[in-house]
Amino acid sequence: MNFKKNALKTAIAAAGIAGSSMSMAGTWAPAAAPLFATENFGANNTGALVVGNAVYTLGTSVANGSQNIIYTLTGGTWGGNGLTSASVVFTNTCTAAQGGKTDAMTFALVDGGANTDNTAQFRVTTAGAGATGGTRVNDTITLVYNVQGVTSLGAATTTGGPTLAFSIGDTVGNVDTSGAATVIASSIVGTTIAGVATAAGDSKIDVSAGTTQFTAPTAGGGGTLSFDAGSFTITDNGGAANGVEDDGATIWQAGTTDSAVTATTVTLTGDFSASVGVDTDLDGNTAEGEGVTISGCLNANATTLTATTATFSLTNANTLAALNTACDININVDGATVIPEFTPALTVAVDYTGATLTDEALALNLAAVAKDGSTAAANLLLNPTGTYDNFIRVSNASAVAGSVFATVYNDSGESVTFTLITSLGAQSSSDLISVEDLYASAQAADATFDVGTGKLRGSFTGEFANINVQNISTSTDGTTFFTF
């Protein structure tokens, strides 16, 4: 009895398959995966991506009757308002030579398809005129759709994007080959920001000029009142290599269409005390940000400049103008203020107007603003008119001779810079130099400099490496001494 039932089932199944055809060699071909710019996939992105239609070409004739089509999406949901019965389109490819048969399929969405779903099932009614009816090989079934909620394309990938699969069957089984899950979108970084510090040693604070200007640069132009600390470049690769916007067609470019920029903010932090008074155009106005500038990609003064921060606020047009060209960061000085040693820190932030887009960011240190030589500090120099005798001793532990320059500060932060030793030989040391003599030299350089009732501190720079400074004081009776 069981044998007869099994035989009957087998016969029915064979009949159903035979009615649909045994060839089952259909072709599944979603549109070539668009290469989206990764910037489309910000944390707030809920918009739809246009990925192109998905076409299935029948590899067998399908008899009149009812079938089911199932589309399965992974890595996203149906975009926009979702799918409807009209989202699937049948194309009759039957030619006159084939008898001009009126192939036909109609579709009704019966399950899924909402913009919160990732599957959709359609009931298919196949009908056609002629002796056998149905459809023929090479007729096509096209899904017109887009997707949303995609998160896997925020980093560049050609394999990790959303996929789409297809199957068509009846109550017995598949009536044609299933379409395997196929990647329908990929991504590439559309815009990059990179920066580089100027090569070490290109230009230094010139200690022989009272540390108020720079040495002549060895490369890259500039002069003794300007230091090229480094550069940044905002790069769009251009063309297809740049990726596309969410419409699947418009080439991504920072500053255009969907990728318009609210502002590009360039911030430099450091010690700009020698830059805030710069007036390069000699108009008497030192509030125009001329102490820190951008050149190369465009010419711009700092929008705001303080003793610690330089900020540039670049418009959308500025950003477009700057693309693909190095933007040099120039630190300019007034030639009178002592230039401090520091390492400027750069940040660049490109803020896209679209809230769903991923903004660009860069942070790096530029070339250190350093003296042309070595420096040592003596942070406690006793009052030159006080009870204790106080001395310094300067040593040159290098293999070359050079001058020694002193910057002396009082407790109020006022300072004066002067030449302390015209030439100190290699491996040589100075005599003991009293703080009283040091103070006298400071007042000779600037008569307004006054220690009052306080103390002093000093910074000593040699035109050579490995300077050493000892601070020596003697007791009131002159019998003992100590260093600090």
Image (cartoon, grey):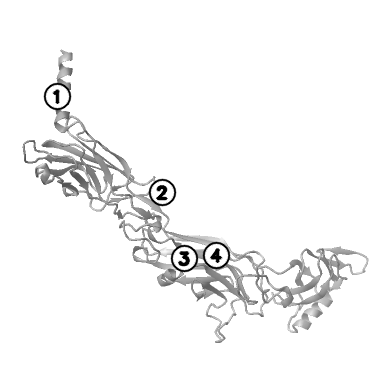
From this view, report whether residue 403 is shown above or below residue 139. below
Mark 3–mark 2 Cα distance, whole angstroms, equals 23 Å
Q: Earlier in the sequence, mark 4 or mark 2?
A: 2
Q: Earlier in the sequence, mark 2 or mark 1?
A: 1
Residue 332 in picture, x, y percent from top left = 60, 75
Q: Nearer the viewer, residue 324 or 352?
A: 324
- The residue singled out by tag 4 in the image is 346
- The residue singled out by tag 3 in the image is 324
Residue 266 in picture, x, y percent from top left = 50, 68
Mark 4–mark 3 Cα distance, whole angstroms, equals 18 Å
Mark 1–mark 4 Cα distance, whole angstroms, equals 76 Å
Q: Earlier in the sequence, mark 4 or mark 3?
A: 3
Badge 2 crowding class, 10 Å Cα cut-off, few under 14, some 14 to 19, many 20 or more, is some
- The residue singled out by tag 2 in the image is 157
Mark 2–mark 1 Cα distance, whole angstroms, equals 47 Å
Residue 179 appears left or right of 60: right
**Mark 3 or mark 2, which is nearer to you?**
3
Secondary structure at numbered mark 4: strand
Numbered tag placed on residue 12 in the rendering: 1
Residue 391 in picture, x, y percent from top left = 85, 70
